[in-house]
């Protein structure tokens, strides 16, 4: 029985539609596979960076790490990640008689090298912010520290049996060697009798160093906030690895 050209057209269109659907499905599967592979690579890079950072700063918990940009596989093939964000908590202070831990450290790294050992990381440039809670600052200084009434200043209170409390207002600023300096000390409440004055002098006379900050970071500014002191760092060619971070 002879089939007309009109009868063959719907079948041709149907076959063409099926081929198109199959091609689209195949392309979608390849795309999904590429995305999954890229996410796996990103997760591995994040885990390795977190391990290096934890080793270098001795944080009790593994920091959170996020690798930016897509695809990550091409970045890894090139030997560096364009941008990585790290957030770590409770970085301890060692090697000092006034240990001031970093309550929270947020770090943005550009050009993070993906070579080298698993416990070492190197970045082309870094911007970081360390948050120091007033509770931790108070423990380090042996005084009760809180935000002051004026910008750039904090209040520090020392209490003595029978003599009562003495409160001073002091400016805070960045000092060399990644240290926080307390200057322009003014008595705002109480009588600074010799024992109280001695305690205040011992706590505030010398800048307090920030320990376990990744090597290459430099303290640029500090700013008192409602809950603590925010310290801003920048650096070029920054490395963090065991035994060589500021300690």
Image: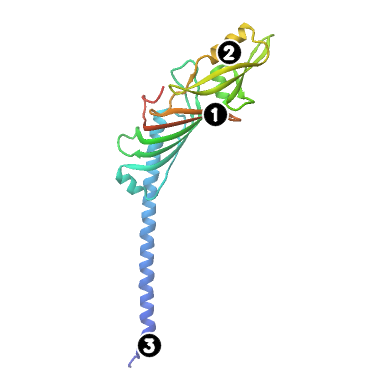
Q: Nearer the viewer, mark 2 or mark 1?
A: 1
Q: Which residue is mark 3?
A: 7
Instruction: Residue 74 in the image: state x and y as whole percent.
Output: 33, 49
Instruction: Residue 80 in the image: state x and y as whole percent.
Output: 33, 41
Residue at the image position 64 percent from the left and 7 percent from the top: 193
Residue at the image position 39 percent from the left and 52 percent from the top: 36
Q: Depth check: give the residue in front, 159 or 167.
A: 167
Residue density around tag 2, few if under 14, some if 14–19, many if 20 or more, within 10 Å = many
Residue at the image position 39 percent from the left and 26 percent from the top: 245
3 or 1: tag closer to the N-terminus? 3
Mark 3 → mark 1, Cα distance in angstroms: 81 Å
Instruction: Residue 143 in the image: state x and y as whole percent.
Output: 59, 17
Residue most toward the top? 194
Q: Which residue is mark 2?
A: 200
Instruction: Residue 155 in the image: state x and y as whole percent.
Output: 62, 21
3 or 2: tag closer to the N-terminus? 3
Residue density around tag 3, few if under 14, some if 14–19, many if 20 or more, within 10 Å = few
- Tell me the quarter of the picture where residue 127 sits: top left
Mark 3 → mark 2, Cα distance in angstroms: 100 Å
- Tell me the quarter of the picture where residue 11 sits: bottom left
Mark 2 → mark 1, Cα distance in angstroms: 21 Å
Numbered circle sitting on residue 236: none
């Amino acid at each position: 029985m002879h089939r007309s050209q009109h009868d063959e057209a719907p079948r041709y269109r149907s076959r063409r539609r099926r081929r198109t659907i199959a091609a689209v499905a195949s392309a979608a599967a390849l795309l999904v596979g590429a995305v999954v592979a890229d996410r796996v690579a990103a997760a591995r890079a994040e885990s390795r960076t977190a391990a290096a950072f934890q080793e270098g700063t001795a944080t009790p918990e593994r920091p959170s790490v996020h690798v930016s940009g897509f695809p990550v596989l091409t970045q890894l093939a090139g030997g560096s990640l364009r941008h990585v964000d790290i957030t770590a908590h409770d970085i301890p202070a060692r090697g000092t008689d006034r240990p001031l831990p970093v309550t929270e450290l947020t770090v943005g790294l550009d050009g993070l090298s993906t070579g080298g050992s698993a416990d070492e990381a190197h970045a082309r440039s870094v911007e970081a912010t360390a948050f120091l809670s007033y509770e931790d600052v108070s423990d380090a200084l042996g005084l009760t520290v809180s935000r002051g009434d004026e910008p750039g200043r904090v209040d520090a209170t020392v209490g003595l049996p029978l003599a009562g409390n003495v409160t001073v207002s002091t400016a805070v600023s960045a000092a060399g060697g990644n240290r926080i300096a307390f200057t322009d000390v003014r008595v705002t409440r109480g009588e600074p009798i010799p024992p109280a004055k001695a305690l205040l002098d011992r706590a505030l006379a010398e800048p307090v160093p920030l320990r376990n900050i990744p090597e290459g970071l430099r303290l640029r500014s500090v700013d008192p906030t409602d809950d603590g002191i925010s310290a801003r760092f920048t650096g070029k060619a920054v490395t963090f690895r065991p035994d060589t971070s500021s300690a």
